[in-house]
Image: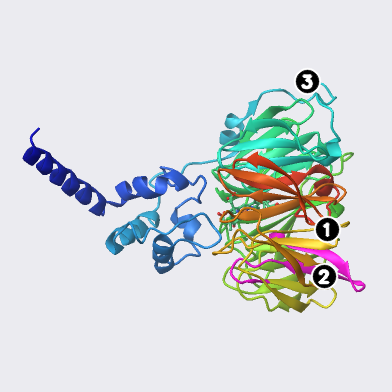
Amino acid sequence: MNKIEHCLAGILLLCFTTVALATDDAPVLYQQYCAACHSKDRLGAQGPALLPQNLKRLRKKQAFHVISQGRPATQMQGFGNKLQPAQIQSLVDYIYTPLKHMPKWDLAAIRASQIVQHRAGSLPDKPKFQADIDNLFMVVETGDHHATLLDGDTFEPIIRVPTRFAVHGGPKWSEGGRYIYFLSRDGWVSKFDVYNLTWVAEIRAGINARNLAVSADGRYIMVANYLPHTLVLLDSANLDPVRVIPAADEKGQTSRVSAVYSAPPRHSFIAAFKDMPELWEISYPEKTAVSLSFDIRKLKLKGILDDFFLTQDYKRILGSTRGGGTQVIDLDSGRDIARLDLPGLPHLSSAITWKRNGTRVLATPNIRKSEIAIIDTNTWKIIKRIPTKGPGFFMRSHENSPYAWTDVFFGPNRDLMHVIDKQTLEIVKTLKPAPGKTSAHVEFTKDGRYALLSIWDMDGAIVVYDANTLKEVKRIPMVKPSGKYNVHNKLTRSEGTSH
Ligand code: DHE
């Protein structure tokens, strides 16, 4: 090829690329820009399903804004610098078009997906390694979809195993730390036998799932789904599906499930919904019960709960709506007992509590405002708003620690971590463990002596701090370690961690 031909070929290639990029053929654009996170058939994967049924609360105008600007508090980036407005509009119209064939994900489909590698009872009942089981951590490494089992005394990894794609939320421990259950965004529940360091069973409970909860007695797993609109109850032994509970109101209008949590003292699961103002309490039978009845108590609310927090005694629930407004509901009477002035979007599922001046205070980060709100849980009054260097996502403490840790997850200061004195309610130190890299999600050892912090980076780490002197003790390389979960703190429902 001579120089002129080379130039012409270059111009042609440029024209072709421009034409290809300028296409407003929505299905093509979708495959190019959206499919990697939302799946090629729009059923959701790491990102939510993009179907009209799932977008009920998002007006088309807002969807246009989200595609061009991204969505705070999610991994959704903006495409305004890559796509023309007409192309964005064609994508909006495309995602609001119903699928020609809505896939069913019923009991039969769930059952057909089940994989049992080792049946319950077939593996030894003794750990294969030496460590205090009560002080183990499971670290989820979302960077390359792995999980690391960490010894909480030596801070040495015991094993690192691949997980399903995009595990989200906290994996849940059960039976004294023998088993741990993971959930991926695309609905896979995976059971890991810690004693034998192996996966034992898996099942796909939904097409797009939110989170899972384990019953207090360890016998049941409840999965909250976005798609389909269901709660799925599994028998924990081999993850056999027991029941699919449609998430629907009395008129048959279905809803995505916001989340489900276990309420051990109540012997129940508590679920809230994204598209209907209801709160469900699903009780499970005692071990000795003859019949398998799962009663559902449905409370009507004044507003939708997108995110919520259950008090330590499981008597009250504090819930927030993305559109604004935080309500306190008494779980026994179902009554709305207080309203809180918490502008922005308090991240209540990350809230923690502690005792101060004879009362129990609740502290919540806010994913739209640079503050930590401190609330008296007797009066439900806000007693302090602690200004931070940016909106935060997670918050943690421990019964034995004088400090509460909170990240600055969003904005230019995301490499900072504030340490707050739980009595004076002042920030006493701001750490910068890895300049330029997000530092987030702290979890304590079982005695509260050490705090483990994540550096959310492909070249990331767990940084271990002495929780009293706030000095670094150790750095363990990890691949974007999103969260870590300590057996003791989770199973004892420590006031300083999420449940
Ligand atoms: Fe999460 C927990 C919802 C985005 C990382 N997140 C949870 C839980 C819920 C939730 C309901 C509690 C689950 C549990 O542990 O039982 N998360 C949401 C959202 O609605 C939101 C804002 C939007 C979405 O994309 O679904 C969202 N979450 C994210 C992220 O973008 C994060 C930062 C990265 C990721 O992995 O996707 C993220 N979420 C986490 C983590 C937890 C979590 C690490 C566990 C917290 C804990 O310690 O308990």
Q: Is residue 375 magenta?
A: no
Say which residue label 2 marks. 361
Dot 1 amino acid type: Glu
State which quarter of the image contains the N terminus: top left
**Marks 2 and 3, how far apart in space?**
46 Å
Dot 3 amino acid type: Ser
Say which residue label 3 marks. 122
The residue most toward the right is 358
3 and 1 marks in contact (CB < 8 Å): no
**Marks 1 and 2, how far apart in space?**
11 Å
N-terminal label among 3 and 1: 3
**Front-most of residues 212 and 86:** 86
Residue at (66% x, 64% y) in the render = 347
Structural crowding at the residue carrying mark 3, measured as other residues with C-alpha within 10 Å and reported as few (<14), some (14–19) or many (≥20): few
Span of residues in magenta: 349-371
Say which residue label 1 marks. 495
